[in-house]
Amino acid sequence: MASTTRRRSGAADRRAALEKRILAVIEELLRDGVTYTELSVEQIAQAAGISRSTFYLYFRDKVDVLLRLSGSLKSESHAIASSWRPCGPGGGLDGLARTYELIMRHYREHATLLSAINEVAAYDPAVRETWTADQDRYAEHLVTVLKEEQREGRTPEDVDPRLAATVIVHGGAQVIAQQVSGGDTGDDAAVARELATGYWYGVYRRPGGPAAG
Protein backbone atom coordinates (compact mmCIF):
# COMPACT_ATOMS: atom_id res chain seq x y z
CA MET A 1 0.00 0.00 0.00
CA ALA A 2 2.81 2.41 0.92
CA SER A 3 4.64 1.97 -2.41
CA THR A 4 1.40 2.55 -4.34
CA THR A 5 0.89 5.79 -2.45
CA ARG A 6 4.44 6.88 -3.26
CA ARG A 7 3.98 6.12 -6.98
CA ARG A 8 0.77 8.14 -7.09
CA SER A 9 2.43 11.02 -5.28
CA GLY A 10 5.34 11.02 -7.73
CA ALA A 11 2.98 11.07 -10.71
CA ALA A 12 1.00 13.91 -9.17
CA ASP A 13 4.19 15.86 -8.57
CA ARG A 14 5.30 15.41 -12.17
CA ARG A 15 1.90 16.52 -13.40
CA ALA A 16 1.95 19.60 -11.18
CA ALA A 17 5.46 20.51 -12.34
CA LEU A 18 4.54 20.21 -16.01
CA GLU A 19 1.36 22.23 -15.55
CA LYS A 20 3.35 24.93 -13.79
CA ARG A 21 5.85 25.05 -16.67
CA ILE A 22 3.10 25.30 -19.28
CA LEU A 23 1.39 28.08 -17.38
CA ALA A 24 4.70 29.94 -16.98
CA VAL A 25 5.60 29.87 -20.68
CA ILE A 26 2.21 31.28 -21.61
CA GLU A 27 2.90 34.35 -19.53
CA GLU A 28 6.30 34.65 -21.22
CA LEU A 29 4.73 34.43 -24.68
CA LEU A 30 2.15 37.04 -23.77
CA ARG A 31 4.86 39.38 -22.54
CA ASP A 32 6.46 39.10 -25.99
CA GLY A 33 3.41 40.87 -27.41
CA VAL A 34 1.31 37.97 -28.72
CA THR A 35 -2.39 38.23 -27.92
CA TYR A 36 -4.02 35.20 -26.37
CA THR A 37 -6.33 34.82 -29.37
CA GLU A 38 -3.28 34.63 -31.67
CA LEU A 39 -1.43 32.19 -29.44
CA SER A 40 -1.57 28.60 -30.71
CA VAL A 41 -1.35 25.31 -28.85
CA GLU A 42 1.70 24.53 -31.00
CA GLN A 43 3.47 27.66 -29.73
CA ILE A 44 2.64 26.83 -26.13
CA ALA A 45 3.80 23.23 -26.44
CA GLN A 46 7.02 24.16 -28.23
CA ALA A 47 7.88 26.85 -25.65
CA ALA A 48 7.24 24.35 -22.84
CA GLY A 49 9.37 21.69 -24.52
CA ILE A 50 6.54 19.20 -24.92
CA SER A 51 4.51 17.71 -27.76
CA ARG A 52 0.96 18.74 -28.63
CA SER A 53 -0.25 15.32 -27.47
CA THR A 54 1.33 15.88 -24.06
CA PHE A 55 -0.31 19.30 -23.85
CA TYR A 56 -3.71 17.67 -24.39
CA LEU A 57 -3.05 15.23 -21.57
CA TYR A 58 -3.19 18.16 -19.17
CA PHE A 59 -5.48 20.71 -20.82
CA ARG A 60 -8.58 20.40 -22.97
CA ASP A 61 -7.70 23.48 -25.02
CA LYS A 62 -6.42 27.06 -24.72
CA VAL A 63 -9.52 28.13 -22.83
CA ASP A 64 -8.91 25.46 -20.20
CA VAL A 65 -5.39 26.86 -19.74
CA LEU A 66 -6.73 30.38 -19.26
CA LEU A 67 -9.34 29.18 -16.78
CA ARG A 68 -6.63 27.63 -14.63
CA LEU A 69 -4.47 30.74 -14.92
CA SER A 70 -7.35 33.00 -13.93
CA GLY A 71 -8.17 30.73 -10.99
CA SER A 72 -4.60 30.98 -9.71
CA LEU A 73 -4.56 34.75 -10.18
CA LYS A 74 -7.84 35.24 -8.36
CA SER A 75 -6.95 32.86 -5.52
CA GLU A 76 -3.99 35.00 -4.54
CA SER A 77 -5.88 38.29 -4.84
CA HIS A 78 -8.70 36.77 -2.77
CA ALA A 79 -6.20 35.81 -0.07
CA ILE A 80 -4.83 39.37 0.00
CA ALA A 81 -8.29 40.92 0.18
CA SER A 82 -9.61 38.47 2.77
CA SER A 83 -6.74 39.21 5.12
CA TRP A 84 -8.14 42.72 5.75
CA ARG A 85 -10.74 43.27 8.44
CA PRO A 86 -12.31 46.61 9.41
CA CYS A 87 -11.01 46.31 12.98
CA GLY A 88 -7.90 44.82 14.49
CA PRO A 89 -4.26 44.69 13.35
CA GLY A 90 -3.83 46.00 9.82
CA GLY A 91 -7.46 47.12 9.72
CA GLY A 92 -9.03 50.52 9.37
CA LEU A 93 -8.76 52.95 6.48
CA ASP A 94 -4.96 52.70 6.28
CA GLY A 95 -5.11 48.91 6.16
CA LEU A 96 -7.77 48.97 3.46
CA ALA A 97 -5.69 51.34 1.32
CA ARG A 98 -2.67 49.08 1.77
CA THR A 99 -4.76 46.06 0.77
CA TYR A 100 -5.84 47.71 -2.48
CA GLU A 101 -2.24 48.65 -3.20
CA LEU A 102 -1.08 45.06 -2.65
CA ILE A 103 -3.79 43.78 -5.01
CA MET A 104 -2.66 46.26 -7.67
CA ARG A 105 0.93 45.14 -7.21
CA HIS A 106 -0.14 41.50 -7.58
CA TYR A 107 -2.01 42.22 -10.80
CA ARG A 108 0.84 44.32 -12.19
CA GLU A 109 3.12 41.30 -11.77
CA HIS A 110 0.68 39.39 -14.01
CA ALA A 111 -0.50 42.29 -16.20
CA THR A 112 -0.21 40.31 -19.44
CA LEU A 113 -2.33 37.52 -17.97
CA LEU A 114 -4.96 39.96 -16.72
CA SER A 115 -5.09 41.50 -20.20
CA ALA A 116 -5.52 38.04 -21.76
CA ILE A 117 -8.35 37.18 -19.38
CA ASN A 118 -10.17 40.41 -20.20
CA GLU A 119 -9.53 39.80 -23.92
CA VAL A 120 -10.99 36.30 -23.96
CA ALA A 121 -13.78 37.04 -21.46
CA ALA A 122 -15.19 39.49 -24.02
CA TYR A 123 -16.16 36.61 -26.31
CA ASP A 124 -15.90 33.38 -24.30
CA PRO A 125 -18.74 32.74 -21.82
CA ALA A 126 -16.76 30.15 -19.81
CA VAL A 127 -13.93 32.56 -19.06
CA ARG A 128 -16.31 35.44 -18.37
CA GLU A 129 -18.50 33.38 -16.03
CA THR A 130 -15.51 31.94 -14.16
CA TRP A 131 -13.97 35.39 -13.69
CA THR A 132 -17.29 36.78 -12.45
CA ALA A 133 -17.82 33.79 -10.14
CA ASP A 134 -14.45 34.43 -8.51
CA GLN A 135 -15.50 38.01 -7.80
CA ASP A 136 -18.83 36.81 -6.44
CA ARG A 137 -16.96 34.50 -4.07
CA TYR A 138 -15.18 37.43 -2.46
CA ALA A 139 -18.40 39.46 -2.43
CA GLU A 140 -19.96 36.71 -0.31
CA HIS A 141 -17.04 37.00 2.12
CA LEU A 142 -17.60 40.75 2.30
CA VAL A 143 -21.32 40.28 3.00
CA THR A 144 -20.33 38.32 6.10
CA VAL A 145 -17.90 41.06 7.17
CA LEU A 146 -20.50 43.81 6.73
CA LYS A 147 -23.17 41.90 8.66
CA GLU A 148 -20.70 41.40 11.49
CA GLU A 149 -19.91 45.12 11.46
CA GLN A 150 -23.62 45.92 11.68
CA ARG A 151 -24.09 43.56 14.63
CA GLU A 152 -21.23 45.32 16.41
CA GLY A 153 -22.78 48.73 15.68
CA ARG A 154 -19.88 49.94 13.56
CA THR A 155 -21.67 49.99 10.20
CA PRO A 156 -25.07 51.73 9.82
CA GLU A 157 -28.12 49.48 9.71
CA ASP A 158 -29.38 51.12 6.50
CA VAL A 159 -26.45 49.68 4.53
CA ASP A 160 -27.55 46.72 2.39
CA PRO A 161 -24.65 44.25 2.90
CA ARG A 162 -25.18 42.35 -0.34
CA LEU A 163 -25.61 45.41 -2.53
CA ALA A 164 -22.69 47.17 -0.87
CA ALA A 165 -20.45 44.11 -1.28
CA THR A 166 -21.36 43.87 -4.98
CA VAL A 167 -20.51 47.52 -5.58
CA ILE A 168 -17.24 47.31 -3.63
CA VAL A 169 -15.98 44.13 -5.31
CA HIS A 170 -17.12 44.65 -8.90
CA GLY A 171 -16.64 48.41 -8.89
CA GLY A 172 -13.23 48.12 -7.26
CA ALA A 173 -12.19 45.43 -9.75
CA GLN A 174 -12.93 47.76 -12.67
CA VAL A 175 -10.91 50.61 -11.18
CA ILE A 176 -7.99 48.28 -10.42
CA ALA A 177 -8.06 46.74 -13.90
CA GLN A 178 -8.00 50.18 -15.53
CA GLN A 179 -5.17 51.34 -13.28
CA VAL A 180 -3.08 48.23 -13.94
CA SER A 181 -3.64 48.30 -17.71
CA GLY A 182 -3.22 52.02 -18.34
CA GLY A 183 -2.23 53.85 -15.17
CA ASP A 184 1.18 54.90 -13.89
CA THR A 185 2.69 52.61 -11.28
CA GLY A 186 3.58 55.68 -9.26
CA ASP A 187 -0.13 56.48 -8.94
CA ASP A 188 -1.09 53.12 -7.45
CA ALA A 189 -0.89 54.30 -3.84
CA ALA A 190 -3.04 57.36 -4.55
CA VAL A 191 -5.65 55.34 -6.45
CA ALA A 192 -5.69 52.70 -3.69
CA ARG A 193 -6.20 55.43 -1.10
CA GLU A 194 -9.11 56.98 -3.01
CA LEU A 195 -10.78 53.58 -3.38
CA ALA A 196 -10.33 52.85 0.30
CA THR A 197 -11.56 56.27 1.39
CA GLY A 198 -14.69 56.03 -0.73
CA TYR A 199 -15.65 52.65 0.67
CA TRP A 200 -14.57 53.38 4.23
CA TYR A 201 -16.65 56.53 4.61
CA GLY A 202 -19.42 55.30 2.32
CA VAL A 203 -20.00 51.93 3.98
CA TYR A 204 -17.88 51.07 6.99
CA ARG A 205 -17.92 54.45 8.72
CA ARG A 206 -20.56 56.45 6.93
CA PRO A 207 -20.66 60.14 8.04
CA GLY A 208 -23.33 60.54 10.67
CA GLY A 209 -23.03 56.90 11.64
CA PRO A 210 -20.65 55.27 14.13
CA ALA A 211 -17.31 56.97 14.56
CA ALA A 212 -14.20 55.53 13.01
CA GLY A 213 -12.46 53.05 15.26
Image: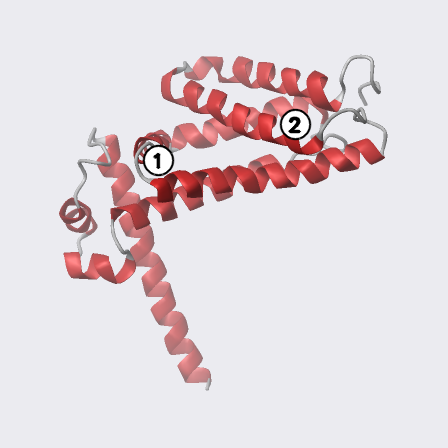
Residue 174 visible within the image? yes
Q: Which mark is first along the chain, 2 or 1?
A: 1
Q: Is residue 8 above or below residue 33?
A: below
User: Callout 1: helix, strand or loop?
Assistant: helix
Relative horizontal placement of residue 15, taking residue 162 as reference (left or right) = left
State the residue in front, 188 or 163: 163
- Which residue occupies 46% across, 32% down? 106
Q: Is residue 51 visible?
A: no
Residue at the disc numbered 1: 121
The disc at residue 181 is none
Residue depicted at x 16% and y 43%: 40
Residue 69 occupies quadrant? top left
Res 164 label: 2
Relative to 50, does residue 98 appear above or below in the rendering? above
Q: Amino acid at mark 2?
A: Ala
Q: Position of residue 44 (x, y in %)?
A: 19, 46
Q: Residue at x 73, y 30 (%)?
A: 86
Amino acid bearing label 1: Ala
Determine whether 58 is above or below 156 in the image.
below
6 or 41: nearer the eye? 41
Where in the figure is residue 188, as x and y percent of width and height? 49, 17
Residue nearest the observer in this picture, 165 or 107? 165
* Relative image position of residue 193 (x, y in whole percent): 59, 16
Q: Quadrant of residue 127?
A: top left
